[in-house]
Image (tube, rainbow, N blue to C red):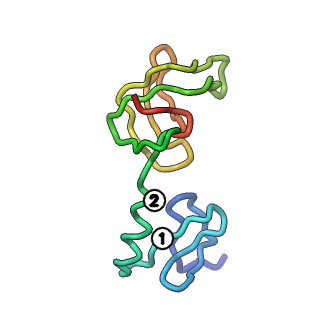
C-alpha cells in the first residue's frame, strides 16, 4: 500500500486529502485547512472550524447550560430525551456529535449542537 505524504483530514480522518493552492482539501467532508506555515490562511479558516453554534446560531462554549429542542431517541435503548430537557455543564468536542454531557436519569451522552438551544 502506498502511503499518502499528506496529512489525514482533521474533521473526518479521510486519507484522500489533496492540495489546492495554499490549502489542504478533503473531498469526503469538504473540510479545508491551511498548509503548515501559511499564517494568513490559518486565521481565515481556523475561526469557522472551531466555532460550535446551537440551533438558533448562538455560540456555545464549555460549561454552558442548554435545553433540548426536539425529542431524541437514545440509540440502542428505548429511552427518549424529551423536548425541554435541561443539560448542564456541557463539554464541546470535535466530530458529528459535538457535545458531551450527562443527562439526569439517562447518563453520559453525545448530542449534536443543532438539537439544543443555549439557556
The picture quadrant where one finds residue 60 is top left
Q: How many marks?
A: 2
Quadrant of the drawing holding the N terminus: bottom right
Residue 30, x across and y down, in percent? 61, 65
- Secondary structure under tag 1 reads strand
Depicted 57 relative to depicted 49: above or below? above
Residue drawn at point x = 56 percent, y = 81 percent: 19
Q: Contact, CB < 8 Å: mark 2 with mark 1?
A: yes
At label 2, counting other C-alpha atoms closer than 10 Å, the crowd grade (few under 14, some 14-19, many 20 or more) is: few
CA gap between label 2 and label 1 equals: 9 Å
The picture quadrant where one finds residue 100 is top left
On residue 49, the disc is: 2
Quadrant of the drawing holding the C terminus: top left
Marked residue nearer the N-terminal end (2 or 1) = 1
Residue drawn at point x = 48 percent, y = 70 percent: 33
Depicted 44 relative to depicted 116: above or below? below
- Secondary structure under tag 2 reads helix
Residue 34, x across and y down, in percent? 45, 75
At label 1, counting other C-alpha atoms closer than 10 Å, the crowd grade (few under 14, some 14-19, many 20 or more) is: many
Residue drawn at point x = 56 percent, y = 34 percent: 115
Q: Residue 96 versus residue 16: which sits nearer the camera?
A: 96
Q: Residue furthest bottom?
A: 21
Left or right relative to 74: residue 118 = left
Residue drawn at point x = 60 percent, y = 26 percent: 70
Residue assigned mark 1: 33
Amino acid at each position: 500500500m502506498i502511503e499518502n505524504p499528506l496529512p489525514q483530514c482533521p474533521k473526518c480522518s479521510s486519507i484522500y486529502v489533496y492540495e489546492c493552492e495554499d490549502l489542504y482539501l478533503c473531498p469526503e467532508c469538504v473540510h479545508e485547512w491551511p498548509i503548515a506555515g501559511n499564517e494568513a490562511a490559518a486565521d481565515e479558516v481556523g475561526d469557522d472550524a472551531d466555532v460550535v453554534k446551537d440551533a438558533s446560531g448562538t455560540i456555545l462554549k464549555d460549561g454552558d447550560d442548554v435545553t433540548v429542542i426536539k425529542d431524541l431517541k437514545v440509540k440502542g435503548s428505548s429511552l427518549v430525551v424529551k423536548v425541554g430537557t435541561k443539560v448542564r455543564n456541557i463539554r464541546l468536542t470535535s466530530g458529528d456529535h459535538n457535545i458531551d454531557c450527562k443527562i439526569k436519569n439517562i447518563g453520559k451522552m453525545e448530542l449534536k449542537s443543532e438539537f439544543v438551544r443555549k439557556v
